[in-house]
Image (cartoon, rainbow, N blue to C red):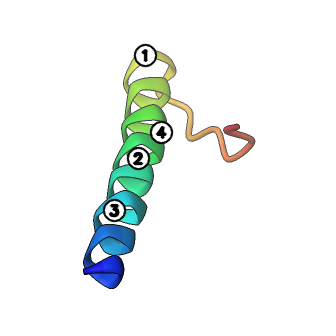
Amino acid sequence: MQVFTNIIVLTAIYALICCGYVLVYRVSRVLNLAHG
């Protein structure tokens, strides 16, 4: 059960990071790798 919870949390964190990259790219049309 702990492994499943860790996978869900890690996936959610990756999804939020990806949403940030997509938002910055769609607004500025520049891939900003200094995100965070």
| Residue that numbered label 3 is attached to | 11
Disc 3 to disc 1, C-alpha distance: 24 Å
Left or right of residue 35: residue 26: left
Q: How far from the left and from the top, in percent, is residue 8? A: 28, 64
Q: How far from the left and from the top, in percent, is residue 17? A: 48, 45
Q: Closer to the N terminus: mark 1 or mark 4? A: 4
Q: How far from the left and from the top, in percent, is residue 18? A: 41, 47
| Residue that numbered label 1 is attached to | 27
| Residue that numbered label 2 is attached to | 18
Seen from the viewer's position, the closer of residues 33 and 16 is: 16
Q: State whether residue 21 is above or below residue 9.
A: above
The three-letter amino acid code for the residue at tag 2 is Cys
The local crowd at label 1, few if under 14, some if 14 to 19, many if 20 or more residues have their Cα within 10 Å, is: few
Q: How far from the left and from the top, in percent, is residue 20? A: 46, 33
| Residue that numbered label 4 is attached to | 21
Q: Disc 2, disc 1: CB below 8 Å?
A: no
Q: Disc 2, disc 3: CB below 8 Å?
A: no
Q: Disc 4, disc 2: CB below 8 Å?
A: yes
Disc 1 to disc 4, C-alpha distance: 10 Å
Residue at 35% of width from left, 78% of height from top? 2
Q: Closer to the N terminus: mark 2 or mark 1? A: 2
Q: Closer to the N terminus: mark 2 or mark 3? A: 3
The local crowd at label 4, few if under 14, some if 14 to 19, many if 20 or more residues have their Cα within 10 Å, is: some
The three-letter amino acid code for the residue at tag 4 is Tyr
The three-letter amino acid code for the residue at tag 3 is Thr
* SS type, badge 1: helix
